[in-house]
Image (spheres, grey):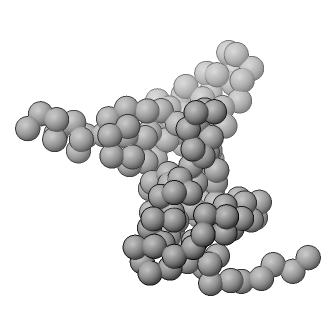
């Protein structure tokens, strides 16, 4: 089946690419699109997101059954499969860690516990340094 390039798909991909360090909900995406002058109905946002997730251009994260799914642009480098992610609970910023200790933890899980960590879905929550500075002011 041929995949059509639509303006909605282009705008949605552009939105996620411009916000690649943030996990965005469908509502966040809809608001962003509306602010950019590209209003799109929620059913269209979800339909396009499903297609983009299926094609591998976008990653979908589901934290728990009480939270909305989050989406992130999946760049072609594949680097998200090689590191853990930190998410600021205050501002929503997504931080990609490239840290030897985190790789050692993943290696330990595999070797000692027979458990392969899926780094594309690994997300640790906390507060980023910028938000910590703001709290201290």
Depicted 73 relative to depicted 136: above or below: below
| Residue occupying the point 77% across, 82% down | 4
The answer to whether any part of residue 83 appears in the image is yes
Quadrant of the image occupied by residue 110: top right
| Residue occupying the point 71% across, 30% down | 116
Quadrant of the image occupied by residue 31: bottom left
Depicted 85 relative to depicted 24: above or below: above
Q: Position of residue 26 (x, y in %)?
A: 56, 57
Q: Quadrant of the C terminus?
A: top left
Q: Quadrant of the N terminus?
A: bottom right
| Residue occupying the point 53% across, 53% down | 25
Which residue lies most toward the right here?
1
| Residue occupying the point 72% across, 23% down | 115
Q: Position of residue 77 (x, y in %)?
A: 60, 62
Q: Position of residue 135 (x, y in %)?
A: 16, 35
Q: Position of residue 86 (x, y in %)?
A: 44, 39
Which residue lies most toward the top here?
112
Judged left or right of residue 131, residue 76 is: right
């Amino acid at each position: 089946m041929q995949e059509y390039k639509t303006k909605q798909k282009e705008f949605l991909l552009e939105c996620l690419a411009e916000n690649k360090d943030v996990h965005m909900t469908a509502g966040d995406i809809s608001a962003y699109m509306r602010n950019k002058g590209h209003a799109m109905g929620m059913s269209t946002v979800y339909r396009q997101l499903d297609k983009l997730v299926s094609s591998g251009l976008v990653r979908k994260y589901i934290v728990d059954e009480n939270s909305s799914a989050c989406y992130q642009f999946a760049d072609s480098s594949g680097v998200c499969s090689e590191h853990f992610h930190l998410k600021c609970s205050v501002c929503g910023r997504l931080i990609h860690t490239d840290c030897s200790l985190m790789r050692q933890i993943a290696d330990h899980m595999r070797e000692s516990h027979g458990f392969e960590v899926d780094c594309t879905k690994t997300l640790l929550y906390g507060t980023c340094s910028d938000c910590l500075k703001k709290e201290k002011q």
